[in-house]
Amino acid sequence: MANERGRHAARPDAVAKLGGNPGYPSDRLRPGQLHGAILGSAHPHARIVSIDVQAALALPGVHAVVTAADIPGVARYGLRVVDRPVLCDDKVRCVGDPVAAVAAETLALAEQAAALIRVVYAPLPLVDDMAAALQAGAAAVHESGNLLHATAHRRGDADAARLACTQVIEAEYQSPRQMHAYLETEGGVVEPDGAGGWVVHFGCHNPERDRQVIAAMLALPPEQVRVVGTPVGGSYGGKDELTIQPIAALLAWKAGRAVRLQLRRPQSVDLGVKRHGMRIRMRTGCDAQGRLRLHEVDILADTGAYATHGPEVLDAAQEHAVGPYRYDAVAIEGRLAYTNNGIAGAFRGFGAVQVQFALEQQMDRLAQAVGMDAAAFRRINLEAADGPGPLGQVVVPFNGPSLALAAVARHPLWQGPRQWTDGRWRRGIGLALVHRSDGFGRGGPNGTRLVIALAPDGAVELRTGFTELGQNLIGSLRSLAVRCLACGEDDVRPVLGDSGLAPDSGPVAASRATTLVWQALTTRGAAWQERLCALAAGVLGTRAGTLRAGAGGLWNAGELCLSYAALAQALGDARPQMLIELHGEETPSEIDAAHFVFGACAALAQVAVDTWTGGVRVERLVIAAALGPVVSPMGLLGQMEGGALIGQGMATTEVLAMQGGRYLARNLDGYLIPTLADAPQMEVITIEDLPEGDVVGPRGAGEIGVNIAVPVIANAVGVALGMHVRALPVTADAVLDFLEQSE
């Protein structure tokens, strides 16, 4: 159990964080920095007629004013779809869309100058409904039209499966926008490096990707841009994509000075990405024995003004819409629409959590319809451990769903009463099961690169482009180095997220970092030790076979005979370093975006519903995480518990409503997230067993805590009230309406 094994293990960055000096990008205060401010659109959809910056330029203390016309290189960026302008040139597509920016001596002056910029707009028709956006005649958000991405997957004989069903559940589910609500809003500093280049200190997931975009925008060779992306004051996926980094770099380049740019919370709400709102229709059927036969799904998602990670989110929704279950026939269709509703992008749970909420409601309702226990119904419908993946693709054999389900099914909480009334409170115990893809799908950047090096001071450096987002990557790297390189924790110095010091490791996203570092060090760790022993033997004039690597240096017959520092000093510029490249496993199946590796979680939730107010209180969560070997108990526990609270917010309180293309809440006083006072009693059960011959190692814990918490809490509410939960969050109004109707 991770909560026992890791309870007292201090994180390496704990002292810095508790002392208020962890080195977040927004804390990088230096004399002589200019302050940046952005002028965002006040319209959700409008054509730009003209921009006049003369009044802003004339203000004393203003050093730079930039518009799209000032960009010397590539003016747009994106992932699979390059559609987002650094600064808008032809039109704006959402409230807050950046049109111009200013760098001045003070923040107040920069904001004053930005307010003096005169932009003439010609309003365009508002596109604020994702279904209407895809109808003929709808105003186009982009010239290509409003359908950004579509998916389809079919297998099996649907007609035969339909005839075999004795129970069919058909329902429509709504999942809302959700805000990341990180403490540190988007921000950082861009500084001259003294040699004609620029150093970018911003919170991000992939420094190399940021470097390429910024260098292309400034028409500079990539080596003249260095991105330092650690640590981050909260991301949860929201800082996986570039937002204002290019604007800060453009201001610094234009002014020839260091510029710090930080969004205020209302700006962050307007411009930052959100979880995709989705409408999910499901028709699921089983036979009289409870065997799943038919599963039909229709997904409609709102990506907002720009693509960002939207296509990948829809791909993930399609892939997870079937869960870890087996059916005779499956049909899934998905569509992703452009609208003027802000910008949607990466968020923990990443497209899967929305459909998992719907699917697990379907499973509960079918189990009830055939008179089966919810756990038993799921158990008889599990796909085999060596069976195909959810889209029929070849996947790594994995029995995690079965092990996780068994762990919660035998838990005392599941063995007791499932529903009871205590005065005004109705309580229920819910169960849910999910699996979650690890890494990127077929065709994604699934490989990585990292370097092991002996530094001049004798530290064993692990250099990787992965960034520390709060997931305890530093602790995980140290733990893996001890295990695989045979050194001590104090010998290890992780070098993270710096494009000038570390290789391009790809994004720290999709729960991939720990798994890839594990694979790199377990496959090459012995070779590193052999190399150190050989070099030390040359220094000592002895045989390499008599030495072994250990804590502090090289050992012989139980005695430390050469420290790492002494070895580094003796070798000088001949100090060793080893580049490890992993090319990444992909599913052999010819299915676009399909994944090769999955982890699994099952959970129980106990909720109490107040029949007077309609409020929902989550009292207990029991999560069984089948993710393989635990690298960092403290890191895993933090990821699971933190993710569960984000899921609790999505299930019970968080909805970012819009009206006329504008968010109705632009600060945390109007957008309610769970606090520690709302946190339930949590128990995390870790299942480290893996099938014999597994080649993957630990699965990531970065997202699956969110994925399991949402459906299990919704299911628990359903049990407590006998209510079919069709929309998230479960609001007090929805509860009271149900109670009134049921009475």
Image (cartoon, helix red, strand yellow):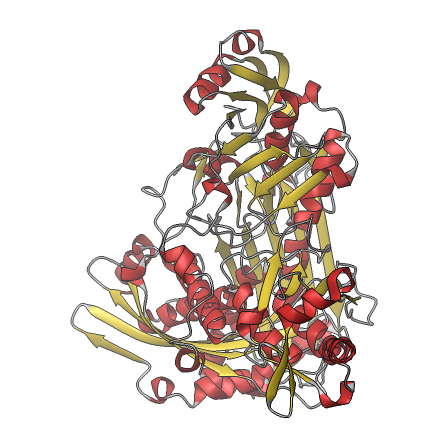
The spot of residue 169 in percent (x, y) is 53, 70
Question: Who's the residue at 75% across and 24% down the image?
Answer: 72
Q: Position of residue 240 (x, y in %)?
A: 60, 50
The residue sitting at 65% across, 70% down in the picture is 566
Q: Is residue 13 above or below residue 668?
A: below
As displayed, is residue 72 above or below residue 463?
Answer: above
- The image quarter containing residue 291 is bottom right
Residue 266 in the image: above or below residue 579: above
Which residue is at a point 73% across and 32% down the rendered structure image? 217
Q: Residue furthest front?
A: 541
Q: Residue furthest bottom?
A: 557
Is residue 109 or residue 623 the one in the foreground?
Answer: 109
Whether residue 211 appears in this view of the structure is yes
On screen, residue 11 versus residue 291, left or right, reads left
* Residue 524 against residue 405 in the figure, above or below: above
Q: Which residue lies furthest to the left in this view?
A: 423
Q: Which of 248 and 579 is in front in this view?
A: 579
Tell me where residue 458 sits by quadrant. bottom right
Query: For the N terminus, which image quadrant?
Result: bottom left
* Residue 170 appears in the rendering: no
Where residue 99 appears, x then y in whole percent? 59, 23
- State the residue in front, 386 or 263: 263
The count of marks equals 0
Quarter of the rendering occupied by the C terminus: bottom left
**Image location (x, y in percent) of residue 91:** 64, 23
**Residue 536, quarter of picture:** bottom right
Q: Nearer the viewer, residue 368 or 455?
A: 455
